[in-house]
């Protein structure tokens, strides 16, 4: 917004009568000087500028101190709306949203501007080329975290890396097996101690370089160079050998029946060996990063992609954490959101259960009464899964007793009376000591925290709520929380996801458990890569049982995700973490709404 427009809005909000917009108003230079917070000389300069822009009519009074006449030739709302449209045309979405929240914007105008923003967000076509450009715009209510495959941790960042980068193989949830990726085929030795991958020819990175086996080797070696928290899964690799440009072998110190899961994980997203990583991944994926700053991430379709080119041409993701309280978000469905986009009119929706669940984990590195098993069990009774669903509903669709919904369905989950929790507190010698519960500042987590605090109050347990900041640090959790509400959403490759949950030192379990608990978990998963699938799953469930029986983790509910969709949106396919695969989305014209010609 130009400075002159700001001056006009300041004057109009103070002086312009809404019922007689163009009627002259009697004012003095001194009065305007006070409103504009400047000298009388500057006031005259500002008035001339506003007259040149045909925003006002000004007739100065004759003589010092005489009353002058000021008429507003345009309404403040007209100028605000025009400025808003100019911001949208310029692609300044953040500034446009900030304008919507300005105090000068009336409630009626605010609703009108949100409606216009609806037309700009979502899917639409831009006539920038003869064939048009299909564009998706959406918002996120937090800033983007580190986009480095070696350190990927959060679901949305993992999802973006999966669109930008590729791995040698990929897990297929429908067949529960692996499909070719950057490798068109592979083989292993009889003892599973040597795995060889044969790479596709002609695959290009986004900056033009042809991918070779040296890039795969560099990607692996980089994990050790940067001390990635994923190293736990690659320590059995004794040597990596390349045979020409398109063959690479991994020689292991002991058999590994799980190796395809490891080589297909996001940590092994192949990066080019000729570019020093600078925070923006250069991959071989169907989308490339065209722009990334604190406000927006822009992805564009990679025309030289070795697979099927995306049908969308551009995706813009705007990061607007200050708008977290707004109910007008345009977000891809996933573990952090309940909807694909918030349209004015919902044409349809799809529901799908997410692998994983919400849970409470205890901070056993922090001293306190929560180290007493009876108190943890009392909290297990208070944090009742059946009552959660009955009293809060929402996305909670079934009680969880495992990360895996089919395991939870096999177990008998019963609602226990709160009197049992009172008796456990008495046995533990609980004397009213405060216990701090930390939780993310999201709608359902906040609901659960407040709900649990009331139930704890009913049994005499003093639970103090500690909402976490959006930009929280690990130290904040470690020093201010006795227990924490978390949520784990597993990848399509759920077996690898569970293993990562229990073995990755970056996860909450290893961060909040003390060395004794960590050692017990490690013992349950020791030598797990040498086991067959039934044996591996059995060991993973034993590790889960260890955390459940000791009440280190209190499973909450499995969650049902909902994507609200426009009728013009086709190609709907959910991938890992429950996000829709944007590489397969396309827009069908003829339905109106958010599709524009």
Image (cartoon, helix red, strand yellow):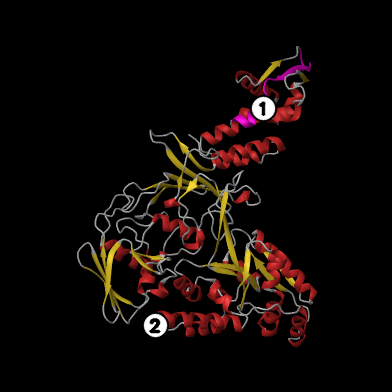
- Quadrant in the picture for residue 212: bottom left
Assess disc 2: are there few (<14), some (14-19) or many (≥20) residues with their C-alpha within 10 Å of its C-alpha.
some
**First to last magenta residue range:** 63-82
- Quadrant in the picture for residue 166: bottom left
Q: Which residue is mark 2?
A: 531
- Image depth: mark 1 or mark 2 in front: 2
- Quadrant in the picture for residue 593: top right
Residue 590 spot, x, y in % from top left: 49, 38
Q: Is residue 362 something that shows in the picture?
A: no
- Along the line of sight, which residue is nearer the eye, 490 or 393? 393
> Which quadrant: the N terminus?
top right
Q: Earlier in the sequence, mark 1 or mark 2?
A: 1
Residue 354 spot, x, y in % from top left: 54, 65
| Label 1 element class | helix
Indicate which disc residue 8 carries.
Answer: 1
Residue 221 spot, x, y in % from top left: 33, 68
Assess disc 1: are there few (<14), some (14-19) or many (≥20) residues with their C-alpha within 10 Å of its C-alpha.
many
- In the image, residue 305 sits, relative to residue 396, either above or below, namely above
- In the image, residue 576 sits, relative to residue 38, either above or below, namely below
| Residue at the image position 34 percent from the left and 67 percent from the top | 220
């Amino acid at each position: 917004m130009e400075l002159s427009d700001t001056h006009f809005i300041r004057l109009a909000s103070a002086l312009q009568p809404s019922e007689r917009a163009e009627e002259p108003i009697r004012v003095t230079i001194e009065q305007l000087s006070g409103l504009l917070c400047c000298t009388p000389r500057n006031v005259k300069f500002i008035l001339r500028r506003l007259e040149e822009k045909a925003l006002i009519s000004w007739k100065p009074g004759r003589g010092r101190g005489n009353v002058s006449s000021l008429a507003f030739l345009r309404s403040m709302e007209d100028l605000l709306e025009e400025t808003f449209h100019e911001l949208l045309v310029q692609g300044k979405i953040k500034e446009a949203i900030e304008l919507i929240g300005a105090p000068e914007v009336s409630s009626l105008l605010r609703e009108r501007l949100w409606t216009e923003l609806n037309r700009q967000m979502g899917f639409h076509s831009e006539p920038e080329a003869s064939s048009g450009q299909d564009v998706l715009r959406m918002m996120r209510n937090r800033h983007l975290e580190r986009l480095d495959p070696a350190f990927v941790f959060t679901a949305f960042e993992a999802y973006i890396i999966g669109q930008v980068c590729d791995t040698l193989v990929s897990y297929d949830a429908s067949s529960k097996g692996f499909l070719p990726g950057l490798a068109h085929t592979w083989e292993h030795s009889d003892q599973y101690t040597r795995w060889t991958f044969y790479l596709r020819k002609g695959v290009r990175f986004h900056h033009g370089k042809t991918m070779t086996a040296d890039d795969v080797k560099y990607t692996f070696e980089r994990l050790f160079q940067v001390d990635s928290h994923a190293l736990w899964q690659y320590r059995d690799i004794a040597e990596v050998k390349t045979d020409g440009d398109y063959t690479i072998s991994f020689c292991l110190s002991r058999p590994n029946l799980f190796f395809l899961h490891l080589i297909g994980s996001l940590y092994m997203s192949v990066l080019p060996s000729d570019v020093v990583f600078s925070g923006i991944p250069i991959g071989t994926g169907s989308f490339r990063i065209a722009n990334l700053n604190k406000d927006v991430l822009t992805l564009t379709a990679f025309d030289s992609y070795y697979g099927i080119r995306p049908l969308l041409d551009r995706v813009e993701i705007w990061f607007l954490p200050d708008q977290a309280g707004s109910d007008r978000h345009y977000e891809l469905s996933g573990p952090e959101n309940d909807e694909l986009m918030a349209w004015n009119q919902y044409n349809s929706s799809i529901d799908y259960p997410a692998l994983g669940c919400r849970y409470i984990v205890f901070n056993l590195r922090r001293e306190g009464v929560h180290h007493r098993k009876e108190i943890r069990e009392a909290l297990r009774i208070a944090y009742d899964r059946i009552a959660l669903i009955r009293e809060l509903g929402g996305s909670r669709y079934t009680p969880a007793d495992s990360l895996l919904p089919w395991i939870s369905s096999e177990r008998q989950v019963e609602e226990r009376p709160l009197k049992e929790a009172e008796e456990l507190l008495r046995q533990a010698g609980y004397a009213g000591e405060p216990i701090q519960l930390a939780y993310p500042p999201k709608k359902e987590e906040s609901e659960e925290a407040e709900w649990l605090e009331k139930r704890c109050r009913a049994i005499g347990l003093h639970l103090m709520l500690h909402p976490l900041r959006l930009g929280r640090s690990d130290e904040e959790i470690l020093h201010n929380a006795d227990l924490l509400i978390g949520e784990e959403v597993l990848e399509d490759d759920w077996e690898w996801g569970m293993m990562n949950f229990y073995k990755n030192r970056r996860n909450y379990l290893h961060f909040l458990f003390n060395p004794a608990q960590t050692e017990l978990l490690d013992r349950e998963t020791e030598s797990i890569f040498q086991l067959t699938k039934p044996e591996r799953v059995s060991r993973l469930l034993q590790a889960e049982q260890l955390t459940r029986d000791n009440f280190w983790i209190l499973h909450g509910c499995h969650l049902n995700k909902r994507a609200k969709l426009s009728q013009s949106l086709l190609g709907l396919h959910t991938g890992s973490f429950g996000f829709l695969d944007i590489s397969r989305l396309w827009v069908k014209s003829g339905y109106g709404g958010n599709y524009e010609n």
